[in-house]
Amino acid sequence: MSTPFRALLLLTLLITAVTCYAQVNIVNFDFGAVPVSCYEGYAYEGAAADCGYGYSVQNFDGTPGFGWMMGGAAARHLAPTSLEGGAGITQPNTIFYPPPFDGMPFSQAVFLQDVGGFVWQNVQGFTPGSYTLSFYLGSRFIDCCGYDGNQTVVALIDGNVVGSWAMSSFTPFTLQTVSFTVNTAGSHTVEFLGARPGDHTAFLSYVTVTATGHPRR
């Protein structure tokens, strides 16, 4: 085999490997593209911006570059005097008592509170095959007075459950992974939701999807 042909073959194999196993692009994977504007450092998702004490709201979904859709009872303002059933964004050291951010590769995280908190994104660039979903997950660092970190977080792909994590209070951010497969190319929905009723809160950030294998053609 000639040297030029060998070099061309190696280059082709490298391009093929990169194409088949490249990381799928998730927009705003660390939830930091849109900073929290409220002075308390956290905000629920909601159309009507309001930085009132104890119930801060910001329109993350409607801001270009945010990438995700969040929701819950609080986000829809169905129960404006209740903090149950919502999703939003927090920075470190807020009244939600997230785990310490020290040493983490992100500065903001989504919170999922009650059974109504959810966040999802239609992710582009899939080809048929197997993938690994990775993210950092932690729970509320307080257990008092009817609120805690005893939340259950469920991960779904296209509405199908691929993993579930039963949290307890005082759980630091920990890297979690779960495998899944898709059978079609194009976009697929990545979603996380809180699954335990009550004022229980978990936090996640740095969501990535990486291809791990594809069927032979």
Image (spheres, grey):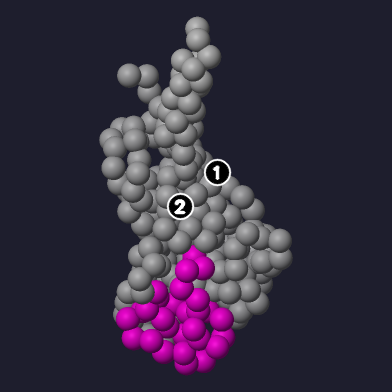
Helix, strand or loop: magenta stretch? loop
Q: Give the residue type that dot 1 points to.
A: Thr
Q: Nearer the viewer, residue 96 or 208?
A: 208
Would you identify the image quadrant in which residue 93 lies?
bottom right
What residue did someone put label 2 on? Answer: 154
Q: Secondary structure at mark 2?
A: strand
Looking at the rendering, the stretch of residues picked out in magenta corresponds to 31-60
Q: Secondary structure at mark 1?
A: strand
Relative to 159, is 27 above or below? below
Residue at 46% over, 21% down: 8
Q: Which mark is residue 177?
A: 1
Q: Nearer the viewer, mark 1 or mark 2?
A: 1
Picture quadrant where residue 105 is located? bottom right
Q: Quadrant of the C terminus?
A: top left
Return the residue found at the far top.
1
**Could you tell me which residue is drawn at 66 percent across and 72 percent down?**
142
In this view, which residue lies farthest toward the right?
A: 102
Q: Nearer the viewer, residue 196 or 217?
A: 217
